[in-house]
Amino acid sequence: MYDDILARLAASDFRRRFVLKDQDFIYIEQKGLDVIAHHAADFIAKRIAPAFPPNDGHQTPMRGHPVFVAQHATACCCRGCIAKWHKLKSGVELTSIQQQYLIGLIMEWIKRQMKHGNQNQCYADAG
C-alpha cells in the first residue's frame, strides 16, 4: 500500500538521510511496535492533525524518538510537508482516515527500518 510513496520519498536526498539509530532500535524493541504505533497516533493527533497546529513547520524534533525520525523520513512532520508529499490540504483538520494513513506510513517505514537496519532499503522494499 505504501510502496509508491516510499519510492518517491527515496528519491529525496533530504528524506533519505533520516535513519533510526541504535538507541531507536533498542527503544522499539523494549516498548514493542504496538506502543510505538500508539505514540505515533498521539503525535499525529496532537501535533499534526489540527487545521493550524502550533509551531507548524517546527513542531517535530529531528531526533529523540523513533516516531520523530520516521515523521521526517516520510514527510509526515508538518502540514506543509504533508500537503506537498501526501496532497492533504493545510488549514483543514485531518480526518481519522487521513491520520490512520499517516500513522500506517510511519509504522511501515519503522518496520522496514527494523528489517533492514539503516540501509535505506526501507523505502524500496516491496514487502
Image (spheres, grey):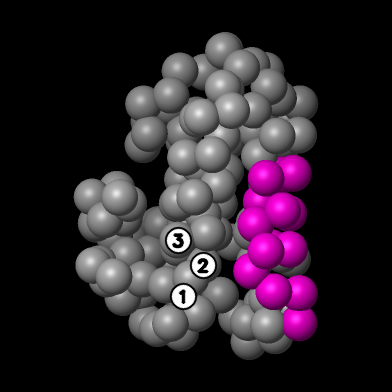
Question: Which residue corresponds to mark 2?
Answer: 110
Q: Which image quarter: residue 12?
A: bottom left
Q: Are marks 2 and 3 in contact (CB under 8 Å)?
A: yes
Give residue 99's position: percent from left, percent from top. 56, 34
Q: Are marks 2 and 1 in contact (CB under 8 Å)?
A: yes
Q: What is the number of the mark on residue 113?
A: 1
Q: CA distance from mark 1 to mark 3?
A: 9 Å
Q: In the image, which residues are magenta?
A: 30-43
Regarding mark 1 in the picture, which secondary structure is present there?
helix
Q: CA distance from mark 2 to mark 1?
A: 5 Å
Question: Which residue corresponds to mark 3?
Answer: 108
Q: CA distance from mark 2 to mark 3?
A: 5 Å
Q: Residues within 10 Å of mark 2 (few under 14, many from 20)?
A: many
What's under tag 1, amino acid-wise?
A: Gln
What's under tag 2, amino acid-wise?
A: Ile
Q: Residues within 10 Å of mark 1 (few under 14, many from 20)?
A: many
- Say whether residue 58 is visible: no
* Residue 2 horizontal side relative to residue 114, left or right: left
Regarding mark 3 in the picture, which secondary structure is present there?
helix
